Amino acid sequence: MRRPMTLPTLRFTTPISTALVLAVGLVTACGHEGGSAGTQTTEDPDTATGTTTSTVDESSTAEPTTAEPTTGNPTSTSDDPDPDTTSGTSGEPEPTLEEQLEGHWVSEGCEPAPQADGSTLYIGRDFVLGLGSWAIEGTIYGDDACSYPLLTFDLGGEFEVVGPAVGIEGAHEANFDRSSIALTPHVSNFVDWFNAEGCGESAWEIGVQQDVTENGCAFVPSATACPVEHDLVALEGSDRLFFGQRPLDGDMCSPRARPTALVEHAVVRQRG
């Protein structure tokens, strides 16, 4: 028989950077464990240039007086650059970071989210990044096997990579638009809480999703109150992705609140 759960006062913003910091009332989606982690290991740039350089045979015995005069640069056969030298040996341009991020990403396992009171909750993340769009389904669990769901959140919108993050190797600043927000409670505690708040489109029920984009609900700010979250992204290789470590108050709704470190837990690209 499961022990009754006492729900803390939570604050929930974008789950793209999971955290559950109960001391300040935060629920998010990327795992909050102190310190920075997940520093990106960047791939070595392609050093091939595709340019063939002419060489001179120093053993040649040809008489200087009979040799044909040479004109121009002996290492180049044309004034036009070799097309392969502009984008590697394949001739294809290097993919942008947005293109590298495109795909389906999920948690490596059941992610622990230690709480300020000494307890631990757990999170699973499943989301899709498109070219300029993002969507996530994240679920908060009460056990380390992620078999006892408490709450599922679905968020999405547009996103853009702003540029390299200063002082964080391999990381880039990214902004995530919160234009779609929905919640699904899996336990009566959340049902009672949401009903008491009077949010949602109708009375809350276990297992029934409701949209809260316009007005928010309890610890979840509306799209108007927090239209964009300012986060970090960092790729490790091509299959592991890290986001920013949220501040303790959970607020990343302004550029000054952007994280200054990466979270420990990565999400992994799904192939096939």
Image (cartoon, grey):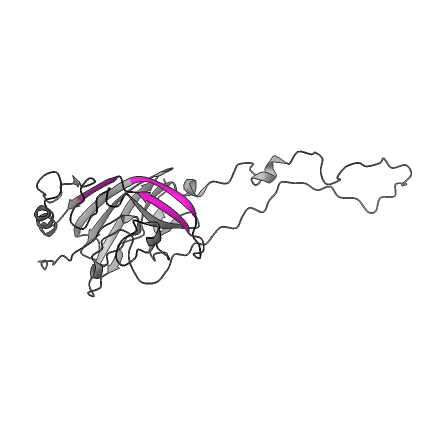
In the image, is 149 to the left or to the right of 168?
left
203 to the left or right of 240? left
Q: Is residue 269 magenta?
A: no
Q: Position of residue 103 (x, y in %)?
A: 36, 41
Q: Nearer the viewer, residue 15 or 57?
A: 15
Measured as percent of width and height from the top left, residue 230 is found at: 34, 48
Q: Quadrant of residue 211?
A: top left
Query: Does residue 173 appear to the left or right of 47 in the view shown?
Result: left
- Quadrant of the drawing holding the N terminus: bottom left
User: Is residue 174 on the magenta stretch?
Assistant: yes
Number of numbered markers: 0
Residues 247 and 84: in front is 247
The residue depicted at 20 percent of the width and 59 percent of the height is 22
Q: Is residue 80 above or below residue 1?
A: above
Image quarter of the C terminus: top left
Is residue 266 something one can see in this rendering? no
Q: Residue at x 49, y 50 (%)?
A: 43
Q: Position of residue 162 (x, y in %)?
A: 41, 45
Query: Magenta residues, as a range?
Result: 157-183
> Residue 116: image x %, image y %?
22, 64
* Left or right of 189 in this view: 159: right
Q: Main secondary structure of the magenta part?
A: strand
Residue at 87% in and 37% down: 67
Tell me which residue sits at (13%, 41%) in the image: 200
